[in-house]
Image: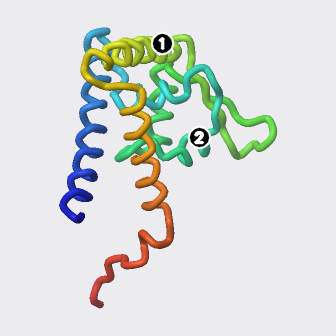
Amino acid sequence: MKAAYLETISLVERLHRQCLEVVKAELEQRSVRDLNNVQALILFNIGEEEFSVGELTQRGYYLGSNVSYNVKKMVEHGYLVQERSPHDRRSFHVRASEKGVEIFHALSKLFDEHAGKLGGAQFSQATLDEANATLRRLQQFWSSPQAGSSRLTTAA
């Protein structure tokens, strides 16, 4: 069981990195040099909606990145519009600018193309649904108190 578990962890990490490489290639093809792949995925997840920076952070999609730093850079480069919340002056809301929405649509089109090719690559809806259910259960396990019951301790 341990070997299969470790392989799953490794595959999840590699899949995430490979997805970032696919996004990076799409940005390079479009000659986008002022946006990195993690920032592009943040834009994709924002889409045409509006979120507080706190909500983006809570979603936790951005492994190895600092959401506030990336939001700041995307605002500087014109991909996001940042406005102070009218209800809570301490909080900021962000939404994609016209330039950011273009990236969202480009990635959406790319992912649509990939989804269309999955059938020819021996993937079915049921296969993906099963994989997603398994990954959600693993996420729930990692989020549960039982997963943290044997935390590493250091000798003082």
Which label is found at residue 7? Answer: none
Q: Which quarter shows the C terminus?
A: bottom left
Can you give x and y, in whole percent of width and height, for residue 123 in the image?
Answer: 31, 25
Residue type highlighted by circle 2: Val
Q: Is residue 149 left or right of residue 20?
A: right
Can you give x and y, in whole percent of width and height, for residue 129 in the image?
Answer: 44, 35
* Mark 2 to mark 1 CA distance (whole Å): 21 Å
Is 54 drawn above or below residue 116 in the view shown? below
**Number of the front mark, 2 or 1:** 1
Name the residue rendered at 60%, 20% in the picture.
Answer: 48
> Which residue is at the front of the view, 127 or 154?
127
Name the residue rendered at 57%, 17% in the picture.
Answer: 97
Residue type highlighted by circle 1: His
Q: Is residue 66 left or right of residue 9?
A: right
| Local SS, label 2 | helix
Q: Which residue is label 1 attached to? A: 105
Alpha-carbon neighbours of circle 1 within 10 Å: few (<14), some, or many (≥20)? some
Q: Which residue is label 2 attached to? A: 53
Alpha-carbon neighbours of circle 2 within 10 Å: few (<14), some, or many (≥20)? some
Q: Which quarter shows the N terminus?
A: bottom left
Can you give x and y, in whole percent of width and height, for residue 116 in the image?
Answer: 37, 13
Is 148 drawn above or below residue 108 in the view shown? below
Is 108 drawn above or below residue 144 in the view shown? above
Give the quadrant of residue 120: top left
| Local SS, label 1 | helix
Kindly give the residue lying farthest to the bottom in the view shown: 156
Is 134 drawn above or below residue 84 in the view shown? below
Of callouts 2 and 1, the N-terminal one: 2
Give the quadrant of residue 131: top left
> For the image shown, how many numbered marks are present on the structure?
2
